[in-house]
């Protein structure tokens, strides 16, 4: 009996250790309650984030929202007023930069112009000459820059210089890679290529990465997780798909992708109508806090153009609304139609329709078509459309 108890205890302990280890992996880097003011201006307001080991996190937001300040605080290049940074269970928020074990890449590359590519990449390596040369060659191989060892930064293209900066940041095999708008100085084509290479390399090395960007497409393509920031706060943390499909606030919905914003009414009994036509929404729970039992409330419906459905046929018992096609444009293999609701011509809806969708052949200017806003893709926000 005693022996059995011992085994049960041991098993429970093992499970507990496993759970703890998993919890630790899930919050390998913890940013807790970071606040930062520049004089009386609040640049960061109570920032809390958890980053998994090996995760690629993008800090996304408009200019001035505090992304770079947060990255610099994590790097120890700026001091927070309060709060801290815990890496793998250890508080590093007050350590000098050199003790924090990260590599960093800046927008401006920040290469030493008077040093060769090799010397730039090997700059932080403390090993002997032979080992250093071996490691530099390995790193240049990794970023596909073999053969450029003896060149100077000015003799390289922007994309190549940024790859040198990346190799230099990874030279000491840091646990954390910090990237401050590393691609924004590159032209569109090179940028896309380097973006894919960066993503590939990050996954291959499994290095936990935080990248600052104001480019939503870039964040969507490259990140495992996006933290959307606005005015020194984190508005939402989620996968690219969550951020896109289930924006937590109007700010997030507007910042990421294009959308329809439609003025609608919420009646005192909790029903939504658009131009008098009943609608269903995905975030129904939010309705209870918006209902005014004494009168109708103005609300705004949000729906992405690719979720708007053009039906092939009108069905009397459906939720479809009749709309007239006002304009059709051809866009990345799809048709983008601007539709005006027959029940209220001032309400216009954008619909992106692919060639395999039933409504595709119906999209001719002047034609009337049945349109549905599927409940699973419509979110309601408080207040009238601006
Ligand atoms: N050293 C400083 N002294 C005073 N104000 C600062 C300082 N550094 C940043 N700020 C201010 O803090 C705010 C946040 O700046 P930050 O550089 O973090 O924004 P950002 O989101 O990275 O913007 P961008 O994308 O334009 O770089 C800005 O309003 C900026 O002017």
Image (cartoon, rainbow, N blue to C red):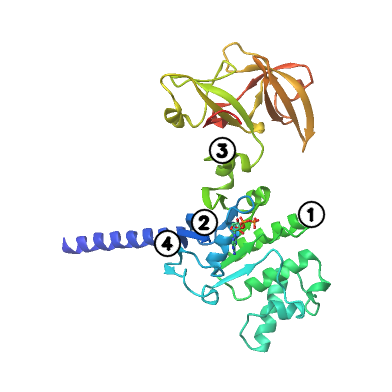
| Circles 4 and 2 in contact, beta carbons < 8 Å | no
**Residue pictured at 80% horizontal, 77% vertical:** 152
Q: Nearer the viewer, residue 43 or 13?
A: 43
Label 3 or label 2, whichever comes before in sequence order: 2
Query: Real-space Cα distance between discs 4 and 2?
Result: 25 Å
Disc 2 beta carbon < 8 A from ligand 1? yes
Residue that numbered label 4 is attached to? 24
Residue that numbered label 3 is attached to? 250
Label 1 or label 3, whichever comes before in sequence order: 1
Give the percent coordinates (x, y) of residue 53. 51, 62
**Residue pictured at 44% horizontal, 31% vertical:** 285
Label 4 or label 3, whichever comes before in sequence order: 4
| Circles 3 and 2 in contact, beta carbons < 8 Å | no
- Please tell me how crowded label 3 is: few (under 14), some (14-19), or many (20+) other residues with Cα within 10 Å: some
Residue 259 lies left or right of residue 325; in this view the side is left
Above/below status of 221 relative to 13: above
């Amino acid at each position: 009996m005693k022996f059995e108890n011992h085994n049960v205890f041991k098993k429970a302990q093992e499970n507990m250790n496993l759970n703890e280890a998993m919890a630790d992996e899930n919050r390998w880097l913890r940013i807790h309650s970071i606040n930062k003011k520049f004089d009386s201006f609040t640049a960061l307001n109570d920032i809390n984030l958890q980053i998994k080991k090996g995760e690629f996190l993008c800090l996304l937001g408009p200019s001035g929202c505090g992304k770079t300040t947060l990255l610099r605080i994590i790097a120890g290049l700026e001091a927070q007023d309060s709060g801290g940074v815990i890496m793998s269970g250890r508080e590093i928020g007050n350590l000098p930069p050199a003790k924090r074990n990260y590599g960093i890449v800046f927008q401006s590359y920040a290469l030493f112009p008077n040093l060769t590519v090799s010397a730039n990449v090997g700059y932080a390596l403390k090993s002997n000459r032979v080992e250093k040369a071996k490691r530099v060659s390995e790193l240049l191989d990794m970023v596909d820059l073999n053969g450029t060892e003896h060149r100077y930064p000015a003799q390289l293209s922007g994309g190549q210089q940024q790859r040198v900066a990346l190799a230099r940041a990874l030279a000491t095999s840091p646990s954390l890679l910090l990237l401050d708008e590393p691609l924004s100085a590159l032209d569109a084509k090179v940028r896309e290529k380097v973006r894919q290479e960066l993503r590939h390399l990050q996954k291959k090395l499994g290095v936990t990465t935080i990248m600052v960007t104001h480019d939503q497409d870039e964040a969507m393509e490259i990140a495992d997780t996006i933290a959307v920031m606005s005015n020194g706060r984190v508005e939402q943390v989620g996968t690219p798909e969550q951020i896109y499909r289930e924006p937590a606030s109007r700010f997030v919905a507007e910042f990421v992708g294009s959308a329809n914003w439609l003025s609608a009414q919420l009646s005192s009994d909790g029903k939504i109508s658009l131009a008098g036509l009943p609608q269903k929404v995905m975030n129904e729970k939010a309705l209870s806090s918006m209902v005014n039992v004494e009168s109708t409330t103005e609300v705004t419906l949000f729906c992405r153009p690719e979720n708007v459905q053009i039906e092939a046929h009108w069905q009397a018992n459906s939720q479809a609304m009749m709309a007239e096609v006002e304009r059709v444009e051809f866009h990345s293999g799809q048709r983008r139609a601007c539709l005006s609701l027959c029940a209220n011509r001032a309400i216009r809806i954008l619909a992106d329709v692919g060639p395999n969708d039933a409504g595709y052949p119906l999209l001719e200017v002047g034609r009337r078509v049945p349109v549905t806003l599927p409940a699973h893709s419509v979110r309601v926000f408080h207040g009238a459309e601006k």
